[in-house]
Amino acid sequence: MHRCMLRFVEQLRQSSVRCMSSGVGRRRALRSAFPVLDLPLQPIHLHVYEANLRNSNACLKMYTEFREKVRKGGGENAVARHTQRNRKLLVRDRLRLLLDDEDFLELSPFAGLGLPYGDIPSAGCLTGIGRINDLWCVFIANDATVKGGTAYPITVKKQLRAQEIAIQNRLPCVYLVDSGGAFLPLQSEIFPDKNQGGRTFYNEAIMSAMKIPQVAVVCGSCTAGGAYVPTMAEEAVMVHRIGTIFLGGPPLVKAATGEQVSPEDLGGARLHSEVSGCVDHFAWEEKEAFDYTRNIISTLNFHLPEEEEDTLKRRTEEEPLYSSEELLGLAPQSYSYSLDVKMIINRLTDGSRFQEFKARYGTTLVTGFAKIHGHLVGIVANNGMLSYEAALKGSHFVQLCDQRDVPLVFLQNTAPAAAMTLSTSQAEINSNRLKAQGSMMSAVACASVPKITVVIGGCHGADSYAMCGRAFDPNFLFLWPNARVSVTAPGHAGSLLVPDDELEEEQQKQEEKLNKRLKEESSAFFSSGRMWDDGVILPQDTRKVLRDALNIIKQQHYQLSTEKLQSAPLRM
Ligand code: COA
């Protein structure tokens, strides 16, 4: 009975897939029955599990504190000024009106915390990917409670990363602009260079040319640089009495010409929708502006899968056999507290199923196929040091996934320090390993399939490059709160110093100092504050984040307006 039902559901699914006009929709997925990885927790794991759990709970506490801190934006006074005096909605309330629901993927929420120039909550700008009329869109929304929404260097970095994600995954962009332009005391770090302020506008133009839609809502000031965001967008909405667009505000006009002019007359919604034509839609109030924006998004030419098909797909998905909460005790507090990574894999995959590849070769790297909420993925997971054999296996598997168009998920937990070379035989091992690692790096760099990296433990040294670290351009890179990111793990600073017997005491002090610094600078929150990643995610949320990321990546296949681009003959 059960099997009949499943067959029936599958037939229905296939027939609705066939109805879709997109080429991708017409394809028929092969069935899979990957073996179940049955790895429950054993008494032998208890000691390590409990230590990891204690560490994860401490990290969770920090995570909650940071989250509360950024939710407060620029603080009570700034919030009161924003809502009462300026009569504007807070940025999260705006997102509530713009998006279908609150279930969005926020990017780098801790960016801007603990920087040399202070704490800049959310880097003064919320970015993420949320659904508007079912369509995943990148949003870039200034938080004007943080120094008038001005752009710090980290704000620019955050905006550019969100745009990069939009480019890589072909996602429409919606900008909620409420910004005083550059944060002037740090102008030299914002204005002149390639990947600074001007790049935002360049990216808007490039994305439009790539048929990646650009929509802006002016719901505050758009002064100086901020003025170009709506003017370069394809379609812009502006809110009466709240939105202004000008290169220099009324005080500047007064200083230059002596003329007294109101912000509304100088660059308000009426002026820009009736006279300059800089914006396309006039809204009396914010709610209306977000309704307009939602309507604009529904004019983008996408053909998403029918809802029934999605529901049927969800019904056939299996949950993992084990609770995701157990990941908290598996998240290693350090490399020596790492348990078999397959215990993490089978807590993330559908039905805890995993089709392992080369199970008996290069076992310090685990590779294989699995499904995550129905998406077929190739998993590459560290399970020890990346040996010569492990790196060769990694190259082979990554190329295999690339040939089959299967997205890759890297679970990174790399060795704390490079292997010491104290003998000729060790030197030979190291140089062979070096060549194999180089091959794996090439395979990862050249693989054209989507890549998602989750740092589940350590992100150290060259192994982290082969495991698709930030420099290897994964579509998304997330960290667990227990993760450590540094060239060498804390406690291993000795590997960076050349031993010298005469300077033993001096060196010991240096080593201690360096280890202390490594400890401070390698925490996941330190990394995320500087945007070396796309955010810290909780281990128990990983399956959901991966599902969202895979759905987001897949959406580009449903954009009808690119079909013309793809089928057009190449002009040489
Ligand atoms: N650089 C540095 N700090 C700035 C700033 C800028 N460009 N613009 C505003 N700020 C700061 C203010 O000093 C104030 O700091 P405080 O809270 O420590 O006192 C905070 O941001 C909020 O500004 P405030 O003017 O009190 O708020 P507001 O809501 O009334 O007005 C703006 C916000 C952005 C409209 C207004 O501050 C403004 O017009 N700023 C100048 C914009 C400009 O000329 N930019 C040119 C950049 S090239």
Image (spheres, rainbow, N blue to C red):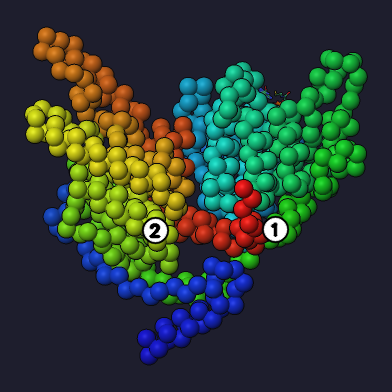
Lateral position of residue 3 relative to residue 514, left or right: right
* Residue nearest the viewer, comparing 418 with 147: 418
Residue 132 drawn above or below residue 389: below
Lateral position of residue 556 relative to residue 35, left or right: right
Q: Which residue is mark 2?
A: 403
* Residue nearest the viewer, comparing 568 with 60: 568
Q: Give how far apart the Cα atoms at labels 1 and 2 are.
A: 31 Å
Q: Callout 1, which amino acid?
A: Leu
Residue 194 drawn above or below residue 94: above
Displayed-image quarter of ligand 1: top right
Q: Position of residue 467 (x, y in %)?
A: 33, 44
Q: Which residue is mark 1?
A: 300
Does the rendering let one see residue 533?
yes
Residue 82 drawn above or below residue 501: below
Residue drawn where x is 46% and y is 47% of the image = 476
Q: Position of residue 243 (x, y in %)?
A: 78, 38
Residue drawn where x is 59% and y is 63% of the image = 558
**Is label 1 in contact with label 2 (beta carbons under 8 Å)?**
no
Q: Callout 2, which amino acid?
A: Gln
- Label 1 or label 2, whichever lies nearer to me, is 2
Lateral position of residue 277 relative to residue 153, left or right: right
**In terms of secondary structure, where does tag 2 sit?**
helix
Task: Tally the numbered discs.
Answer: 2
Q: Which residue is situated farthest in the front direction here? A: 572
**In terms of secondary structure, where does tag 1 sit?**
loop
Residue drawn where x is 51% and y is 31% of the image = 112
Number of other residues with Cα within 10 Å of mark 1, as a class: few under 14, some 14 to 19, many 20 or more: some
